[in-house]
Image (cartoon, grey):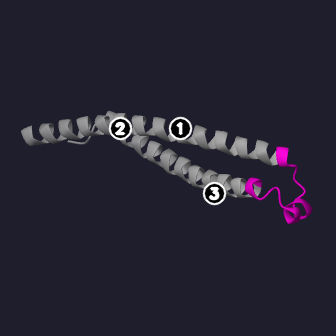
Amino acid sequence: MSREPAHAEAKKEYESLLEQAASTREDIVNLEEQAKQSRKKLERGEGFHYKISDFRDPADQKASSTDIESRLKHQEGKLEQAGSKNRRCEAKLDFWDQKFESHSAIT
C-alpha cells in the first residue's frame, strides 16, 4: 500500500517549513553580526579618529542600529512561529506514519 496524498502533502509542508526556519536562522546570524558592528560604531563614535574617518552622523548610526534591532526581533518572532508550525506539521506526519504502519501491519 502506498502512502496517502495527505502524507505527501504534510511531508512537503514540513520540509518547506524546515527550509524557511534555516533561512530565518541565517538571517538572524547576519543581523546579530550587523547589530554587533553597529554597537561598536556607536561606542567609539565619540573618538576624534572616528569623527574624521566615518562620515556617518551619530543620529543616523543610532537609527540604523535601531532598525537592525527591530529586524532582528522580527526574525526571532518568525523563527518562534515557525517552531510552532513545525511541531504541528511533525504531529501530522507522525499521525500519517502511524496510520500507514498500522494499516501495513493489518494487510
Mark 3 — residue?
33
Choose the circle earlier in sequence order: 2 or 1: 1
Measuring from the top left, give residue 66's x and y in whole percent: 71, 41
Choose the circle earlier in sequence order: 2 or 3: 3
Measuring from the top left, give residue 41's x and y in whole percent: 76, 57
Mark 1 — residue?
78
Residue 48, quarter of the rendered image: bottom right
Query: Element type at marker 3?
Result: helix
- What number is the disc on residue 19? none
Foreground mark, 2 or 3, reads 3
Mark 2 — residue?
87
Q: Which residues are magenta?
A: 42-59
Q: How would you rate the neighbour count of disc 3 (Cα within 10 Å): few for under 14, some for 14-19, many for 20 or more?
A: few
Q: How would you rate the neighbour count of disc 2 (Cα within 10 Å): few for under 14, some for 14-19, many for 20 or more?
A: few
Mark 2–mark 3 Cα distance, whole angstroms, equals: 29 Å
Measuring from the top left, give residue 98's x and y in whole percent: 19, 39
